[in-house]
Image: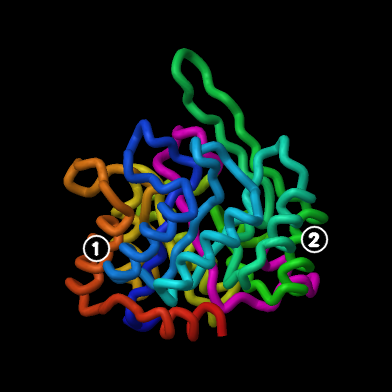
Amino acid sequence: MSADPLIIKACLNGIRGREVADGIPWTPREVADEARRCADAGASMVHFHARTDTGAISYDPAWYSETDRLIRAETDLILNHTTVRTSDVPIATVLRTLRDTREPVDMIALNPGYLVLHVQRSGPGRETLVIPNSYADIKAIINVCAERGIAIEPTALDTGFLSSVAMLVQDGLLDSPRYLLLEFGGAFGDGFQIMPGNERSYRFLTECTREVFPDAIWMAHGIEDSVFDIAKFAIADGAHVRVGFEDRAVLHDGRVAASNAEFVQWAVEQGRALGREPASTSFARSKILS
């Protein structure tokens, strides 16, 4: 992979609460303001989840429509929505969101399988969270995206997910991807059924990606303690990075971030240290969407 300009995606909110960082955006206006700050800092993509005014998870297409409209009024960023849902939410809810969001959607992230998280809560024990995606669910999402002209970002959290992406290509549901998102966890034992965010995992998953999809580029990210290590590996590798509040609230110097833009600024500095300027949105579109 050549040392192209560095595509930086800011993941603006995820499902984080404001008990960890006051600056996490929830409303369309807050998300749009964060998107503009990230664009000014050097991001060419933003990824975000719909939230209610009190921070609850939302699947409201009107929220996405308004957020997209506000961001597009001020930036030319690539807008990356999510199809993640909890196990109590039917796939029909996600499909309705995809169909009824008024503004054209650039891209959605697609998990090609089930994700299981054993999450530590206060007190003893853990809570198991399942993020489902059956083959039928995945097929339905892909079909709606084809109807609406929405690009798909296949995600790989381990080699099993990568194999599922290859299966979808073999079954004719996806074109061979030109771009994938490689996602890493924290460390062994963190309860996430994701490859841990260390160099060995990064090298192994990227070697497998090269083997299965030799013409593809990728973006990589870690979560929590692995965020900065995975970003550094990807930048040095000529790949691309995702950073932001969804993955971590604390900056590399130990301060709680006031804005996603501070993570973007860090990534820009890391890229420039290796001779990689932040990519323009037009460059990112040519690599990821064209």
Q: Which residue shows up at 47% across the image and 49% down it?
A: 27
Are the residues flagged by discs 2 and 1 in contact, CB closer than 8 Å? no
Screen quadrant of the C terminus = bottom right
Query: Seen from this angle, which residue lies furthest top?
Result: 124
Q: Along the horizontal axis of the image, is 97 left or right of 267?
A: right
Which residue occupies the foreground of this view, 213 or 73? 73
Residue 167 magenta-drawn? Answer: yes
Q: Along the horizontal axis of the image, is 3 left or right of 150?
A: left
Q: Which residue is mark 1?
A: 265
Screen quadrant of the N terminus = bottom left
Question: Residue 56, image x and y in percent?
Answer: 55, 37
Whole-number angstrom distance, CA of label 2 to CA of label 1: 38 Å
Q: Quadrant of residue 283?
A: bottom left
Task: Please rate how many residues cluster around mark 1, counting C-alpha atoms within 10 Å: few if below 14, some from 14 to 19, many from 20.
Answer: some
- SS at mark 2 in the image: helix
Amino acid type, mark 2: Ala
Q: Is residue 136 visible?
A: yes
- SS at mark 1 in the image: helix
Q: Which residue shows up at 29% across the image and 70% down it?
A: 40
Q: Is residue 225 above or below residue 243?
A: above
Question: Residue 252, image x and y in percent?
Answer: 22, 49
Q: Is residue 239 above or below residue 262?
A: below
Q: Along the horizontal axis of the image, is 85 left or right of 3?
A: right
Q: How many marks?
A: 2
Magenta-tinted stretch: 165-193
Which residue occupies the foreground of this view, 99 or 163? 99
Amino acid type, mark 1: Gln
Q: Which residue shows up at 52% across the image and 78% down it?
A: 288
Q: Which residue is mark 2?
A: 140
Which residue occupies the foreground of this view, 267 or 211? 267
Q: Which residue shows up at 61% across the image and 75% down it?
A: 177
Residue 161 magenta-drawn? Answer: no
